[in-house]
Image: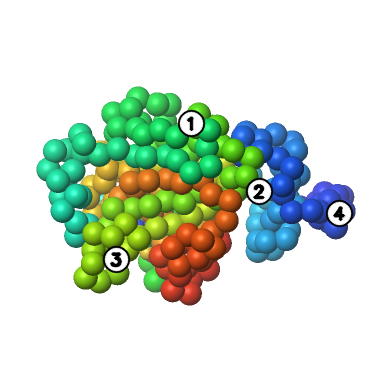
Amino acid sequence: MSEPARRRFLRLAAGAALPGVLSGCDLLAGSEAFNDTLRKAQFLSQRAQALLTGVDAMAQEFTEDDIAAEFRSNGTAMPDSALYRHMLADGFASWRLRVGGLVAHPAHFSLAELQAMPSRTQITRHDCVEGWSVIGKWTGVPLRQLLLRMRPLPAARYVVFHCADPMDGPDLQAPESTYYESIDLVEAGHPQTILAYALNDAPLPVKNGAPLRLRVERQLGYKQAKYLMRIDLVERLDQVRGGKGGYWEDRGYEWYAGI
Ligand SMILES: Nc1nc2c(c(=O)[nH]1)N[C@H]1C(S)=C(S)[C@@H](COP(=O)(O)O)O[C@H]1N2
Ligand SMILES: [Mo]
C-alpha cells in the first residue's frame, strides 16, 4: 500500500463504525461504499495481512502445467449417511442446494440448474493446515451471483454452509452433527469464491466433495466445505452450532483462515 493510500486508509479506519449501513446487496455488489465499509470492517476484525494485500486481492492462479495428477482428499472422503448414498446412487438427480436464511427469496437449485449458470474456472493452490498443498482446476458458480439473486436482507452478514457428512459420533443423522463452515459477505463477494461442481474438467469426485463444494481461495483448506447441502445467510454466528462459525473453529481453529 502506498503511503498516501495508507494514510487515507487509517483515516477511514479511525472514524470507522462497524458495518451496518449497507445492505447485503450493497456488500455483495462491490460498490465504492461497499469497499469503504470493507476496509473499516477489516481494520477492526481481520488480520493486518488483509490490509496490506487489499480486500480485492486475488489468490494466485496457476497454469494447466501446474495441475497435480491427483488432488488428494482430506477429512471426509465418503459421507457416512444413508441420504448421501441415496443421492450418489441416482447421480445426484435428487440432490438440491437449498439457499435461505436472511434472504428475500429463498430457493433451491438442482445440479443441472447450477451448471447452466455463468461459471468461473480457476487453477489454484489448496493449502491444508496440516502442511500439504495441491494445485487443481475448479469450475463453478460465483457465490456472489447466486446470492444476489436471492436478495440478501439488510441484516445478513455471514454465509453458513451446511454439509452432508456426519462428523460427531453415533447419532449421525442429526443435521447439527454434520461438517459446516462460514464466511462473511466480504469473502462471499470475492470473484474467486465459487461453488465448484467440477475439478480438473471432470465432475467433482466424491472424495473431493461431490456434487458441490465451496472454493474460497484466499483461505486454508478447512474453509473449503465439501458436500454442500444448504447455505444460510445469518446476522451472527454465535447462535449457529458451536458458535464459532465452523466444525473446526468450534474445536479451536481460527475462523479467518487467511493464507
Ligand atoms: N464437508 C467437509 N468439508 C471439508 C472437510 C470435511 O471433512 N468435510 N475437510 C476440510 C479440510 S481440513 C480440507 S484440507 C479440505 C480437503 O479437501 P479435499 O478432500 O478436496 O482435498 O476439505 C475441507 N472441507
Ligand atoms: Mo485441511
Using the numbered discs, state the Cα–Cα distance from disc 3 to disc 4 in whole angstroms: 43 Å
Between disc 2 and disc 1, the foreground one is 1
Q: Work out whether mark 2 precedes mark 4 in sequence or the reverse, and give the earlier one.
A: 4
Q: Which residue is mark 3?
A: 167
CB under 8 Å between discs 1 and 4: no
Between disc 3 and disc 1, the foreground one is 1
Question: Is 171 on the left or on the right of 113, as rendered?
Answer: left
Q: Position of residue 210 (x, y in %)?
A: 26, 46
Q: Tell me which amino acid carries mark 1.
A: His
The one nearer the camera, 201 or 88, is 88
Residue 63 seen from this side = no
Using the numbered discs, state the Cα–Cα distance from disc 1 to disc 4 in whole angstroms: 35 Å
Q: Work out whether mark 1 precedes mark 4 in sequence or the reverse, and give the earlier one.
A: 4
Q: Work out whether mark 3 precedes mark 2 in sequence or the reverse, and give the earlier one.
A: 2
Q: Position of residue 110 (x, y in %)?
A: 30, 32
CB under 8 Å between discs 3 and 4: no
Q: Which residue is mark 1?
A: 105
Question: Label 1 neighbourhood size at 10 Å, few (<14), some (14-19), many (20+)?
Answer: some
CB under 8 Å between discs 2 and 1: no
Residue at the spot x=47%, y=59% of the render? 240
Q: Which residue is mark 2?
A: 55
Q: Which quarter of the picture shows residue 258?
A: bottom right
Between disc 1 and disc 4, the foreground one is 1
Find numbered disc 4 in the image and state the secondary structure of the residue it sits on. loop
Residue at the spot x=46%, y=46% of the render? 232
